[in-house]
Image: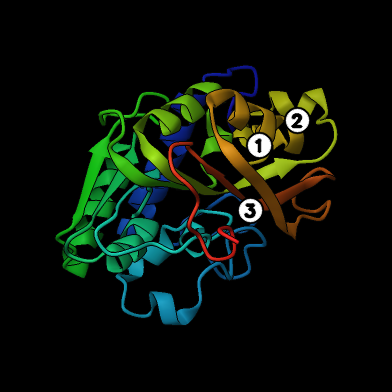
Amino acid sequence: MLDRTNLDVPAAVREKYGAIAKSVASGQAGCGCGACCGQDGDPITSDLYPDTQTQDLPANALAASLGCGNPTALLALEAGQTVLDLGSGGGIDVLLSARRVGPTGKVYGLDMTDEMLALARENQNKAGATNVEFLKGTIEAIPLPANAVDVVISNCVINLSTDKDAVLREAFRVLKPGGRFAVSDVVVRGDVAPDVRRSMELWIGCVAGALEEQEYKSRLAAAGFVDIEIDVWRVYDKEIAAPGFFSAFIRARKPGQACCDPGCCG
């Protein structure tokens, strides 16, 4: 049991997800954001990817998938694009994106946990993905230059940060003009009880750190993003989390050129 009075969230996140990576690498099930361990039956992490997407991926990439959505389904990735995955974990979204951007594109996976990086690189080698690079660092200080990527994705990681404004500013900085932000995350409607916010176990379980829906939009706008959308797709019941929590798809764009996604150019 973690000490709930110790609010060193980054250290707790690193410890938990490092342990998950070791567990998956040794052939055991991981334990993600939900109440159950592993993909099967976990009410938050299960049924996120169709079999047609994952059937050719290394088994450990799927086993270490601890997200709450499928950010690769949020937008049309194109050949030659550069993609950054914030908090890439075992690498499933990086590998899926790498297929879509092709050999002329590039996908970066950023993670702060050595064990997850080692697992992700092992999965990269098994998949034969040559257009992938995993970087060590934090999502609050992305080790890439400004205007470096076309798309930023993330899967249930931003809610874990204790400095979400820094994350959103950094995502905006590294995006090229016209670049797109497309993440899956946990979002809350209404107030969160103080004891939930103080709970370390819920912080590293993807619940207590969730932003309120309108606050998420406001912070994205403050970072400079436009065309902000939040779409709810999975509501959690009280056995999983406090009322008002849900998985959402969050989309936004860095200004600089007209949006050319299907349906937005008239």
Taking the spot 25% from the left edge, 28% from the top edge, the residue there is 145
On the image, which quarter does residue 186 sit in? top right
| Viewer-nearest residue: 247 or 8 | 247
Mark 2 to mark 1 CA distance (whole Å): 7 Å
Between 8 and 83, the one nearer to me in the picture: 83
- For the residue carrying disc 2, how many other residues have a C-alpha within 10 Å: few (<14), some (14-19), or many (20+)? some
The residue singled out by tag 1 in the image is: 202
What residue does disc 2 label? 196
Amino acid carrying mark 3 in the image: Gly
The quarter of the image holding the C terminus is: bottom right
Kindly identify the residue that appears in the image at 61 percent across and 33 percent down. Answer: 203
- Asked whether the residues under the numbered discs 2 and 1 touch, taking CB atoms below 8 Å apart as contact, a structural biologist would say yes
- Per the image, the residue denoted by label 3 is 34
Asked if residue 162 shows in the view, the reply is: no
Residue 250 horizontal/vertical position (percent):
60, 48
Q: Residue at x 58, y 71 (%)?
A: 47
